[in-house]
Every structure is written in C-alpha cells, then in structure tokens.
C-alpha cells in the first residue's frame, strides 16, 4: 500500500503522486519486484491524470502520464548522434575469439591477462538515449552509426526507460546505449492477436521490435509492451557525483552498476571475467542456458573492462577494438520430408510449406516450415522423400536450410508449386517481377475465409463471437459468399450451426448490427486491400472521407494514382493496389451490397454533409462506459455513441451525461451514483440511440 500523503497544495500532491508512481513502476518493470497493488496504482494514476487535466501547468516531462500522448507523428527526423553508435565485429569460434584477444594485447602493448566483462547479446534493436539535466530529451535508432531516426515519443512508452534519472546531481548530459526488445511471451501474444485479426504475423521478435519502434502512433508502441536493457554509458568529463550518487565509473562493470543506480534496467546475466579462459567458460555456460531465457540471444558480447584501456585501444573504421560479439551457431537438425503442402492466404498468395518428420529444435518440436515462394522451392531443388536440414531462423521461425541430395531416394520426383489453386482449382497467376504466386478467383473459399476473418478482426469491424471455426462452417455450407452476406444472417439460422446456442446466435446478430457503426477508416481497413494496413487506412480515410470519394480518385484516368500518392505515407505500390481494388467489378458490387445492408462507408461528417445521416441523438452528451455489456464490445459501444454525436470519456464527473454499466462495473458506477449521474444498461443505451434527439 502507498505511504500516507501530506497534501498541502495541488502542486505538492502532483509531485508526491509522480514520485510514488515512478517508484512503483521502477519496482515493477525494472526490478521485477512489485511493491504496489495494481488497483492502488490505477487509482493514484487516475488522480494524477485528473489533476493535470484540470491544471495543465502541473504537467512535467517526467510525469508517468506523459509516457503516451499527443497525435501520431507525421514522420521521423534524421538526427546526428552525439557519440557514434557503431556495430561490433563478430567472432564465430573460440579460435577467432583468441585471435581478437591477441590483436588487442598487441595494440595495448601488454602481456598477461586482461579483465573482461561478458554480457548476453540481446537480439533486439540498438537505441541511443540522450538526457539533459537528468531528463530524457531524445531517443534515436542506430541508423548508420553517425545518424539515426529520432523516435523519442515511441521510446517514452517503454516503461523500463526512465524519463528522469534517479540522481541527486545529474550531469549536464548523459548518453546511454542499450537494446530495445520484445520478450518471447509478449511476442507470442502479439502474433496471436494479429492472427485473430487476420493480419500477417511478425517473423520474429527482433523484426516486430524494429517495426514497432518506427510506428508513427506512440499508442501502438505502448500496446506492444517493449522492454529495454542499458549497457553503455557516456558522461561529460567534468561531471562529479553529488551526495548519494553512484561514483564516476572507471570500468565497464562499474558503468553497469551506475546505470542501475540511475534507474535503468541492466541485464542481470553479465559477469566480470578475469581472463580469456573465464570468457570461454561464460560463452559455454550460456550456449545451453540461453534456451531458458524469456528473450532471444544469439551470442555474448565481450568487452575490455578498464575504460582507460578502452580509450587506448580505440576504434577501427566501423567498430571498437576493445569489444567483440561471439556468436553461437544456429541449431540445425535433419529430418525427412513427408509432403509439400500449399496454403492460400486472404490475398490469394499461395505459399509452399514443407511438412516433415517432427524434430526437437531450440526448445520446441517442429514439423512444418514455410518455403516462401516458387523461387525458394526451385533454389532448394526439393524432391519427394528428401532428407532436409532444418533450423530456427532467429531462434524462432523454422526454415529449411538445405537438402542432403546425396540421401535422395532413387527415382524421387522433383516438387513444384501446382498450376491450379489447391482450394478452388482456378489457374494460378504469377505477375512479372513478383515473387508471389496467386489465386485470383475472388470466389475461392480460402480467400473468402481469410477476408471474413480480417473483416471481423479487432483492428477492423471488431465483431465478437465470429471465430475461425464458425467462419469455416458458414463458407463450407454456402451460407456466406461475401462479406455483405454476414449481415443477412439471422439468429435462427446461426443457432442451427455446430456449437452455437440460441443466446450466442442472438449476441452475434447484435454484434454484427453494432459493427455497422464502426468508423470509415476501420471499414476501409477491413476490406483487406493489398498493402493497406490500419495506419494507411486511417490516412486514406482522412484524405477521402467516403468510399465514393476514394473510388472517384481511383478512376480509369491514368493520372489518378497521383491523387492517392499525394497522401502522406502512401506510395505508388499502395496507390496502384487501391486503384486495382476499386476498379474491380466484384469489389464495386461488394460496396453496393454493404450500403444496402446499412453501411454508410463514410466518416460521420461526410455522411452528415451529404444528408445520409439522421438526427444525432447524443450531440453534446458525454458518456462513460464501465463493466462488460451483454452483446456490445467496448469499442463497438463507443463507435455507436460517437456516430450519434456523443463523446466517450474515461472518468466520471459532474459533467457526465450518462454512465453505461454492464456486469462487474467498478468504481465508476459508484461515483456515478454518488454524483447523481443517470446510469443506463445496454438496452437503455440502445433505446437512447433510437430516440430522435436527446434532451
């Protein structure tokens, strides 16, 4: 529980709340030793947020409320690093390590042993953090080592990066280097969510982390829960510690301790190593031990401990002489090919997949590996019954490395992609200059199943209760032949399907009806246009606030793509894909069918201007949602309220018009009752939305 607070003013209260919350976050995210219960943290955070919203002058740059905020960035700026962020030379064997050690002794003109520090080589993304007077002022990617991209807003969302250094007398400037990463468990959860939404999966945590750091919207970064390990420190020559501050480090080992004292998370598996034999022992220890870690590591980093000797050793043109990355070989295993399978994605791309006898690899048992495309299949020269060598790329994704052709069975048949779609039998197409082979039959069941999964996913229409198994039934039985057909389903028909009861069927029909109120950019994203992700869909929807306007911009005029590429972030490839989609007759028919089902396919302002909307019953009203509603998801209810002109707030006050409460409603319901705010259930909300106008 938090310690008692002495409140003398709003400013003193805000400062005390910031101190408590920062300490609690450091204990949770850095020390892995929580000292405050989640409900208590949430209550204090809410109190601080309300104080700062009421009095913006109380907001400070290091406030916990400022980790995520502001509008998405328009792009990233290239910035020069104060101190170069160079890469490391690699060693791939102990012999190469010994050769590096010999060169280092020669450069330093020394004999005998050199003390080293061994650190795990985290498979993440290097960052440069800049602090001024103890406050985080800039974060940048590695880039080319001299210049990187400024991504401060995104890095502020990483809870293990301190916004203010825990020092009594901070230096005028501090440069910290470290590795941003996505832990394996978090990565698995992200990919599970993406699979549920019908989105492409990330190949590995490192790629996911790199893509996340370059998101234009910090809220997306925050949701992916990145972590950070600090490992390098640069201080001004004239800095001297104040009372209670850690001493100025003279070695890499002391620098790690300094970083810990300043509030950074430092990997706990580093070791001080007195000689080369200890380095080799450290390397051997983690070759097996790394498999139990909750994040990926592909080697160890060995650094000369003495900072003065580091300065004396200096740098080559591309790397420090005093450090090296000693890499582990990727684990490989032989197996026998069972068959070549083919998967058809929602965009029609046909992907060859090798299915082989199960083998243990990097801590799991694997029996399938993607072969990507026809070119990779031909490069491997794969034959039926081949013995193949498999490994995990980046310790995560199984891949076929090579074929042991000397073990090939006599008379084995060479394997190729089929000429027709394995799902619908249509002729497959491969465009010139493209690696992908596609089925272009819009009625293909595999494409339809993928399109439906994408349409109802959380990032798109967010229809709760329509999972993959149910979609398969609807498609296989011919009940749904397009996205629009979903909105013609009734509860009686749905209840007759496997694992669907009457109540579940009613809830699904209600959820489908509610999804019609989702904003235009989510509808556009849900259409599944090639290359148009959620960020691009928002940009396009803002520039073209209705399907009609976007379709007009993609007319047959050869110059029309210029209208689309004029939108920030939209390139020629995306524009061409959008134009192709909107000029396809089957897709034009789909848009007409959706409009017939009640979709406006436009932003509310555009729809209102064109006279296609009715009265706005919640205009000027503020509503708060709490608890779980019977049929509406939180985002669906919010979309309905906003489409009716209302505003959804996260906190209850005297200005709140209504509180919509479901099961397990919490403190918001109690506060509403104490303030006399009208409380509605889901039925009451829907009745209010149906009224001509609110009072």
Image (tube, rainbow, N blue to C red):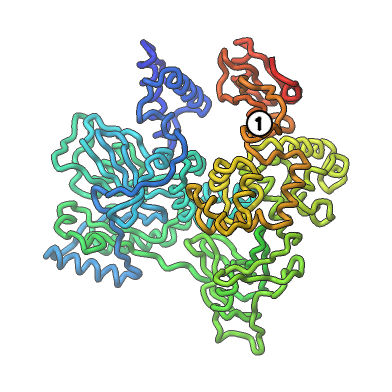
User: Which residue does the image show at 57% across and 12% down from the upper left?
Assistant: 654
Q: Is residue 124 left or right of residue 642?
A: left
The quarter of the displayed image where residue 489 is located: top right
Answer with left or right where residue 449 lies relative to residue 156. right
Q: Quadrant of residue 109?
A: bottom left
Name the residue furthest left. 109
Q: Position of residue 387 (x, y in %)?
A: 59, 79
Quadrant for the C terminus in the image: top right
User: Is 660 in front, or is 640?
Assistant: 640
Residue 466 locus on image (x, y percent): 74, 45
Residue at horizontal 40 percent and vertical 21 percent from the top: 56
- Give the labeled residue for mark 1: 608
Along the line of sight, the residue nearer the viewer: 648 or 358 = 648
> Residue at (27%, 53%) from the top-left corner?
272
| Residue 481 screen position, x and y as percent | 79, 54
Indicate the position of residue 169 as horizontal and vertical percent values.
21, 31
Quick one: label 1, few (<14), some, or many (20+) residues within 10 Å? some
88 up-or-down from 500: above or below: below
User: In the shown orientation, is residue 582 left or right of residue 7?
Assistant: right
Residue 54, can we see it?
yes
Q: Nearer the viewer, residue 408 or 446?
A: 446
Residue 229 in view of the camera: no
* Element under disc 1: helix
């Amino acid at each position: 529980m938090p310690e008692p607070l002495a409140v003398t003013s709003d400013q003193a209260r805000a400062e005390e709340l910031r101190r408590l919350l920062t300490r609690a976050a450091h204990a949770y995210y850095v020390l892995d030793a929580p000292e405050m219960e989640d409900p208590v943290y949430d209550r204090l955070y809410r109190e601080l947020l309300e104080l700062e919203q009421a009095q913006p002058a109380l907001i400070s740059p290091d406030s916990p409320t400022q980790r995520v905020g502001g509008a998405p960035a328009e792009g990233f700026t290239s910035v020069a690093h104060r101190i170069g962020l160079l890469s490391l030379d690699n060693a791939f064997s102990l012999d190469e390590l010994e050769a590096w050690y010999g060169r280092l002794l020669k450069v330093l003109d020394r004999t005998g042993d050199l003390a080293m520090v061994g650190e795990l080589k985290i498979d993440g993304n290097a960052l440069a953090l800049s602090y001024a007077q103890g406050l985080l002022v800039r974060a940048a990617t590695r880039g080319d080592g001299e210049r990187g991209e400024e991504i401060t807003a995104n890095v502020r969302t990483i809870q293990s990066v301190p916004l203010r250094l825990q020092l009594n007398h901070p230096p005028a400037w501090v440069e910290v280097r470290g590795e941003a990463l996505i832990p394996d468990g978090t990565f698995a959860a992200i990919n599970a969510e993406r699979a549920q939404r019908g989105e492409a999966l990330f190949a590995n945590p490192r790629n996911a982390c790199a893509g996340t750091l370059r998101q234009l919207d910090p809220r997306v970064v925050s949701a992916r829960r990145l972590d950070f390990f600090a490992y390098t420190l640069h201080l001004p020559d004239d800095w001297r510690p104040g009372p209670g501050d850690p001493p100025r480090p003279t070695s890499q080992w002391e620098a790690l301790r300094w970083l810990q004292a300043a509030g950074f998370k430092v990997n706990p598996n580093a070791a001080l190593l007195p000689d080369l034999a200890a380095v080799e022992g450290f390397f051997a220890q983690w070759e097996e031990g790394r498999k139990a870690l909750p994040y990926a590591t592909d080697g160890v980093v060995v650094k000369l401990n003495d900072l003065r000797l580091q300065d004396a050793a200096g740098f080559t043109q591309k790397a420090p002489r005093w450090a090296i990355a000693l890499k582990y070989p990727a684990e490989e295993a032989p197996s026998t090919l069972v068959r070549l399978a083919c998967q058809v994605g929602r965009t029609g791309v046909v992907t060859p997949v090798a299915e082989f006898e199960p083998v243990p690899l990097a801590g799991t048992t694997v029996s399938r590996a993607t072969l990507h495309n026809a070119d990779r299949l031909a490069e491997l020269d794969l034959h039926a019954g081949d013995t193949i060598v498999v490994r995990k790329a980046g310790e995560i994704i199984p891949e076929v490395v090579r074929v042991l052709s000397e073990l090939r069975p006599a008379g084995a048949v060479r394997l190729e992609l089929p000429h027709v779609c394995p799902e619908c039998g249509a002729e497959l197409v491969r465009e010139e200059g493209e690696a992908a082979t596609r089925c272009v039959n819009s009625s293909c069941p595999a494409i339809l199943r993928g399109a439906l999964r994408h349409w109802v996913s959380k990032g798109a229409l967010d229809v709760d209760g329509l999972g993959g198994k149910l979609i398969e039934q609807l498609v296989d039985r011919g009940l749904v032949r397009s996205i629009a057909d979903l909105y013609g389903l009734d509860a009686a028909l749905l209840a007759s399907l496997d694992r669907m009861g009457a109540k579940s069927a009613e809830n699904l029909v209600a959820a489908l009806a509610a999804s019609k109120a989702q904003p235009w950019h989510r509808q556009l994203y849900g259409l599944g246009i090639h290359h148009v992700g959620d960020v691009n869909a928002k940009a396009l929807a803002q520039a073209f606030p209705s399907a009609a306007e976007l379709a007009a911009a993609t007319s047959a005029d050869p110059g029309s793509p210029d209208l689309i590429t004029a939108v920030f972030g939209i390139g020629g490839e995306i524009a061409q894909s959008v134009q192709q989609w909107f000029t396809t007759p089957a897709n034009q028919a789909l848009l007409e069918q959706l409009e017939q089902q009640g979709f406006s396919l436009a932003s509310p302002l555009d729809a209102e201007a064109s006279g296609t909307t009715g009265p706005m019953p919640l205009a000027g009203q503020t509503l708060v949602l709490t608890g779980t509603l019977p049929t509406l998801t939180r985002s669906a209810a919010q979309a309905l309220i906003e489409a009716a002109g209302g505003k959804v707030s996260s906190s209850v006050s005297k200005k709140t018009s209504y509180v919509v409460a479901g099961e397990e409603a919490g403190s918001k319901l109690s506060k509403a009752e104490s303030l006399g705010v009208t409380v509605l259930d889901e039925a009451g909300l829907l009745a209010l939305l149906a009224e001509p106008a609110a009072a």
